[in-house]
């Protein structure tokens, strides 16, 4: 992206700064690069009231760089607390959006709590961004707590047309695909990021920098970009001829096993289901029977299974 960055820096318009930061943060998306995070925080340290779109892009950029990595995400959450305390209004307006990007389709209790507080902020844009971010964090999960909070907000802001519109969009994201879809750009056990999915989410996020003249005006169709990120979150097992085959699987919280000796358990607190089965954020599935072998090493989406040639059915004692 070096050549493109140099080209952007030659533009003699205030959009140049924002474009450079957007390009830089997209290039480092999901990398967890600490130096880049420091650079973005440095951009936010300047106290300016107007023409601060580049600062808003930098706040979202922190989320972009640290997303998909637990330690980095926790550190970013702490940084956002500081930004809310000490920075100017434009930076504060971008914090709810950044929280949304950090937890796409992952309604973490503390994040929802923070967004719920921000959704009652006296500043119109902060509260609207917080409402949309609540929709993004809970997208496709049918989370009952978020559904209750959004119902309360629709009553609280019943006389504000802009807020009601944001609440309706958030409710649509929450119940997306009747709870069978996700907007998360990560796949293959969070090892890979889907570029178009992340791009679709970012289109919505960047249009929220100026809600009055985008989503709340005549550019509401920008919400359609979310379709790039929509994915079914169920696990379906099929035979080699692609005919459906129900298989017993265990679904539980994913456990990090890197660098552990022997054969450590990859999931904890699991439940046994028969496919098709829903897999939430932070969960992992593994086969619960030796009868079949999976062609894929990661059980996600549509997985082809085949009979295990070495499998021997357990002998049942025949009653004489």
Image (spheres, rainbow, N blue to C red):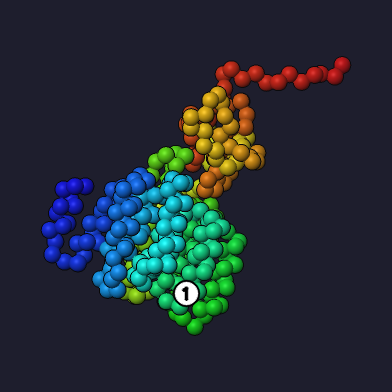
- The residue nearer to you, when weighing 284 against 66, is 66
What is the x, y in percent for residue 251? Answer: 60, 40
Graded by Cα atoms within 10 Å as few (under 14), some (14 to 19) or many (20 or more), the crowding at tag 1 reads some
> Is residue 95 in sight in this rendering?
no
Indicate left or right for 123 with 21 as reference.
Answer: right
Image quarter for residue 221?
Answer: bottom left
The image shows residue 172, relative to residue 271, as above or below, that is below
Instruction: Measuring from the top left, give residue 261's x and y in whole percent.
Output: 53, 25
- Determine whether 139 is above or below 244 in the image: below
Name the foreground residue: 157 vs 296. 157
Q: How many circles with numbers are drawn on the protein? A: 1
Residue at the image point whose x is 34% and y is 46% from the top: 33
* Image coordinates for residue 65, horizontal then vertical, percent: 36, 50
Residue 308: x and y in percent read 57, 22
Please say whether residue 180 is visible from this viewpoint.
Answer: yes
Find disc 1 in the rendering and name its residue: 121
Taking the image as shown, residue 53 lies to the left or right of residue 184, namely: left
Residue that extends furthest to the bottom in the rendered view of this protein: 159
Looking at this view, name the residue that lies furthest to the right. Answer: 320
Q: Nearer the viewer, residue 310 or 13?
A: 13
Residue that appears at 53% across and 55% down: 108
Q: In percent of the image, x 51 and y 59: which residue is there?
A: 111
Identity of the residue drawn at 63% across and 40% down: 270
Q: Answer with left or right where residue 70 lies relative to residue 311.
A: left
Quarter of the image with the C terminus is: top right
Which sits in the foreground, 309 or 266? 266
Q: Secondary structure at mark 1?
A: loop
């Amino acid at each position: 992206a070096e050549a493109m960055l140099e080209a952007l820096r030659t533009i003699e318009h205030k959009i140049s700064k924002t474009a450079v930061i957007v390009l830089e943060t997209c290039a480092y998306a999901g990398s967890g690069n600490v130096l880049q995070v420091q650079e973005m925080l440095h951009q936010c340290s300047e106290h300016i009231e107007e023409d601060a779109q580049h600062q808003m892009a930098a706040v979202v950029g922190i989320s972009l760089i640290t997303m998909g990595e637990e330690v980095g995400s926790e550190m970013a959450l702490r940084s956002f607390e500081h930004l809310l305390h000490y920075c100017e209004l434009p930076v504060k307006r971008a914090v709810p959006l950044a929280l949304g990007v950090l937890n796409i389709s992952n309604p973490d209790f503390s994040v929802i709590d923070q967004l719920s507080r921000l959704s009652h902020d006296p500043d119109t844009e902060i509260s609207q961004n917080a409402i949309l971010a609540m929709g993004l964090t809970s997208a496709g999960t049918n989370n009952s707590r978020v559904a209750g909070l959004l119902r309360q907000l629709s009553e609280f802001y019943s006389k504000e047309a802009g807020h009601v519109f944001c609440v309706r969009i958030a409710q649509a994201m929450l119940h997306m695909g009747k709870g069978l879809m996700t907007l998360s750009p990560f796949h293959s056990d969070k090892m890979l990021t889907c570029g178009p999915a992340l791009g679709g989410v970012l289109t919505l996020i960047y249009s929220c920098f100026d809600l009055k003249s985008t989503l709340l005006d005549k550019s509401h169709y920008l919400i359609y970009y979310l379709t790039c990120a929509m994915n079914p979150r169920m696990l379906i097992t099929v035979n080699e001829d692609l005919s459906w085959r129900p298989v017993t699987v265990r679904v539980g919280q994913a456990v990090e096993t890197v660098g552990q000796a022997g054969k450590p358990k990859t999931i904890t607190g699991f439940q046994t289901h028969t496919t098709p089965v829903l897999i939430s954020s932070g969960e992992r599935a593994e086969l619960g029977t030796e009868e079949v072998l999976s062609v894929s090493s990661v059980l996600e989406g549509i997985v082809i299974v085949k009979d295990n040639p070495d499998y021997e059915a357990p002998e049942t004692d025949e009653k004489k």
